[in-house]
Amino acid sequence: MAQLMHNLREREMVGWVLVLWLGMAVVAAAALGGQVRYDGRSIIVDGHRKLIFSGSIHYPRSTPHMWPSLISKAKQGGLHAIDTYVFWNLHEPQQGQYYFSGRRDIVRFMKEVHSQGLYVCLRIGPFIEAEWSYGGLPFWLHDVPGIVFRSDNEPFKIHMQNFTTKIVNMMKSEKLFASQGGPIILSQIENEYQNVEKGFGDKGPPYVRWAAEMAVGLKTGVPWVMCKQDDAPDPVINACNGLRCGETFVGPNSPNKPAIWTENWTHFYDVYGNITKVRAAEDIAYHVALFIAKMNGAYINYYMYHGGTNFGRNASAFSLTSYYDPAPLDEYGLIRQPKWGHLKELHEAIDRCSNTLLYGTKTNLSLGPWQQAYVYKGERNECAAFLVNANGANAAAVRFQNQTYNIPRKSISILPDCKTEAFNTAKVSSKESRRKMAAAVELASVEMWQELDEVVAVFDETSLRSNRLLEQMNTTKDTSDYLWYTASYEQSEESQSTKISVNSGGHVLRAFVNGEFIGSEHGTYRNQSLVLEKNVSLKRGMNNISLLSIMVGLPDSGAHMELRTSGLEKVRIGETDLSNHPWGYQVGLKGEKMQLYTEEGSRKAKWRKLSLASRLKWYKSKFDAPKGNDPVALNLASMGKGEAWINGESIGRYWISFLTPLATPSQIQFHIPRSFLKPRDNLLVLFEEEWGSPLGISVDTVSVTMA
């Protein structure tokens, strides 16, 4: 009997331990989940006001293999949430055909964020801009009869609502909204619409109202936001995007809405030909602290916290393959100092007094002509202060509560207890990191390479014909960057010098006459159109005119994107206008159709030894993966312009020959995610448009050292 009682008590204790453990698990889940609402001070999760630091990490700009590390480093950096767009054109590239695997696996990404104890802001859009091709809209929308993008237009609204509803229902089915115990505490509908609203006239305001009503009607149990939309309809929260929202934001459009900053730009996105401008950690920290102090800011999202890579052809017009590399986590996922560490210290200082900031009463005190104190006091005499020196030229010594504080120029000192300075935005303690690229595999031998010519298209071999110059995007349907315009031109007598003139809407043009290259031109990000003028020799009789028009990404912004055009607009030979002449078209390259970048397509082709004799060439080689776990990059400094593939995966476009005003390429290193690699015999294929030499290519490992 004694043994029986002992066993019963033991089982009872185990039962209580199990109940306690389950209870703790429920509490842990509730810390992330629960009902989400808001008031004039903050987002409220499960009854508690939250001051949230968030960072943008876009799931398709990295890989599932990288996600856990990126999210972990974001959490270590003091973030409470991860922000991502939803990329419509990735998920529904053809109408009704959906893809959610690999880098597209948004549910897996959400669950990884949740597993690490962070919240999510899900920016569905579904127009996103984001320096992403066509602003994330799938190109098939262009062909919907009567459609006007982002307007009070029934065809667009039907498809926008269908996709938004699909994403919301997917999140609901996986119980990913915080109202279901998941991580999503905010969702966004539309994106920076106020920038283009006037372009839609009287069709703009009703579209805003419809989008808000449609989103709220999906009943997610979490608030919706609209960024850069000062008149966001209730109950949608209007949010700020920009560099200095503490100075530029008009504020919430209702006293019952919190101040939210959805995009605090940690950098300036880069385009080919521009000089990179790196935003200093001190400037970011200053404006975060000012937004919190002055605006009662309760949600700040860093755009980007990790930029990543525009794999394939996903970068928008003229945008680099590398995206927001100078963010706190660089393109490869490595910590970039001092930005990461300085912001981490800022977050720690704010977290120390967040309760006072969220529940206390604020007063403002003048400390000088450029100096001010924002003081928060709680019911139990808690006190937190921000001492601001807005003077960009000189430091200041200020008196606050009978103490003197020396504040550097253009900086803010944070006093979590109104006494001791815990952080100053201009005082950086984190040492600067430096990225090191080390060649692990050098592909410098002729024997390591094979080549194949891309055939110059001619009129007689084309099947698509028209008596006019066709617009490029509508012709290619975004299946390729390349469109051949071909014509047969009869010359009555041999000519040693005939002028050919071509006007194009962009972005790059390469011209051939009778199979011989005669010249090329390209536009720029600010002026994407171009004019090519060359004197050529024509033979008597029929001449083949072959013009390769190349796009470097689709547009991603502006009103009426459905009306945007590209490709050739006018062609003249001598005094003859060929614009309404019979033209033959070839969409894409022969090598693309053959899929030369895949193992199967590569095996079927008849490659030859390297000769480096002409333009428009395919190159292939094989290499073993570098040892270790360091990130890997492909050094293409010796190339011109084209695209690169590893084992059939495109690592993006390259354009080494487009130099900045400093006479340097915009980007020479291209990220190869480790998950793209096999231990041995990795297939590297490049399509090169110019005279680049593959003999200078190397496969590098990437590491970080401290300065």
Image (cartoon, rainbow, N blue to C red):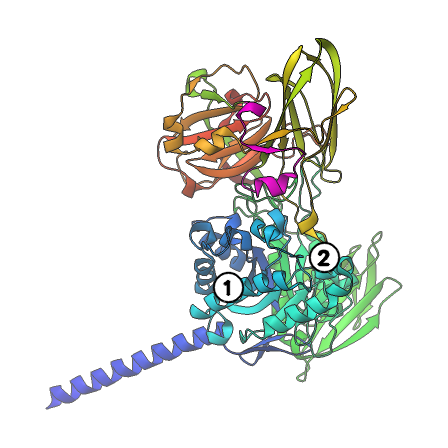
Which class describes the residues within 10 Å of circle 1: few (<14), some (14-19), or many (20+)? Answer: some
Q: CA distance from mark 2 to mark 1?
A: 27 Å
Residue 693, picture quadrant? top right
User: Is 555 placed left or right of 373 in the picture?
Assistant: left
| Badge 1 element | helix
- Mark 1 = which residue? 167
Q: Which residue is at a point 57% across and 20% down the rendered structure image?
A: 615
Does residue 462 lie above or below 159 as drawn?
A: above
> Which is nearer the N-term, disc 2 or disc 1?
1
Residue 577, picture quadrant? top right
Residue 472: say if magenta: yes
User: Would residue 45 be seen by someone viewing this image from the given angle?
Assistant: yes
- Mark 2 = which residue? 242
User: Is 225 placed left or right of 254 in the picture?
Assistant: left
Q: Quadrant of the C terminus?
A: top right
- For badge 1, the amino acid type reads Ile
Q: Which residues are magenta?
A: 456-480
Does residue 430 lie above or below 40 as drawn?
A: above
Q: In the image, which is nearer the foreground, mark 2 or mark 1?
A: 1
Q: At which x and y percent is residue 659?
A: 69, 30
| Badge 2 element | strand
Which class describes the residues within 10 Å of circle 2: few (<14), some (14-19), or many (20+)? Answer: some
